Image (cartoon, rainbow, N blue to C red):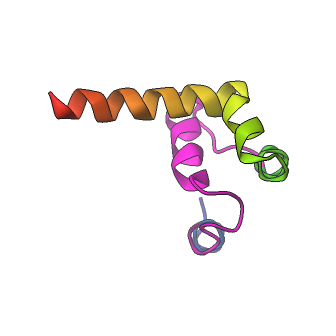
Amino acid sequence: MSGEDFERYYFSKGWVFSGWIGFSQWIKKEFGAYPKNEKLTELRRMKKEEREEHALFGVYLWEKTKQKECKRY
């Protein structure tokens, strides 16, 4: 990611939807590339409940919850 892309990515935190940075980083880790702007825009336009039901976002939330549970023990 170029410097300009990183700045745009970092400083727009919260503009797309809450949690989008973590979601983007997870996609990069799992699939080797950040999600396309179109996918982020699609998720942003959804209501929170709809977004949480989206397949990829749902798996991300599930893994995030599992990691927190594992850290407790």
What residue occupies the far front of the structure in this picture? 49
Residue 41 within the segment the image draws in magenta: no
Range shown magenta: 10-36
Question: Which image quadrant: the N terminus?
Answer: bottom right
Q: Residue at x 70, y 68 (%)?
A: 15
Question: Where is residue 6 shown, x and y percent of the image?
Answer: 58, 67
Relative to 66, residue 50 above or below: below
Question: Where is residue 45 shown, x and y percent of the image?
Answer: 85, 51
> How many numbered marks, from 0 up?
0
Relative to 45, residue 8 above or below: below
Q: Is residue 49 left or right of residue 13?
A: right
Q: Residue at x 56, y 52 (%)?
A: 19
Residue 23 within the segment the image draws in magenta: yes
**Residue 18 sits in quarter:** bottom right
Q: Residue at x 80, y 43 (%)?
A: 39
In the image shown, does 41 or 37 lie closer to the viewer?
41
Question: Which image quadrant: the C terminus?
Answer: top left
Question: Where is residue 13 shown, x and y percent of the image?
Answer: 59, 68
Q: Is residue 20 left or right of residue 25?
A: right
Q: Residue at x 62, y 29 (%)?
A: 58
Q: Is residue 50 left or right of residue 8?
A: right
Relative to 68, residue 15 above or below: below
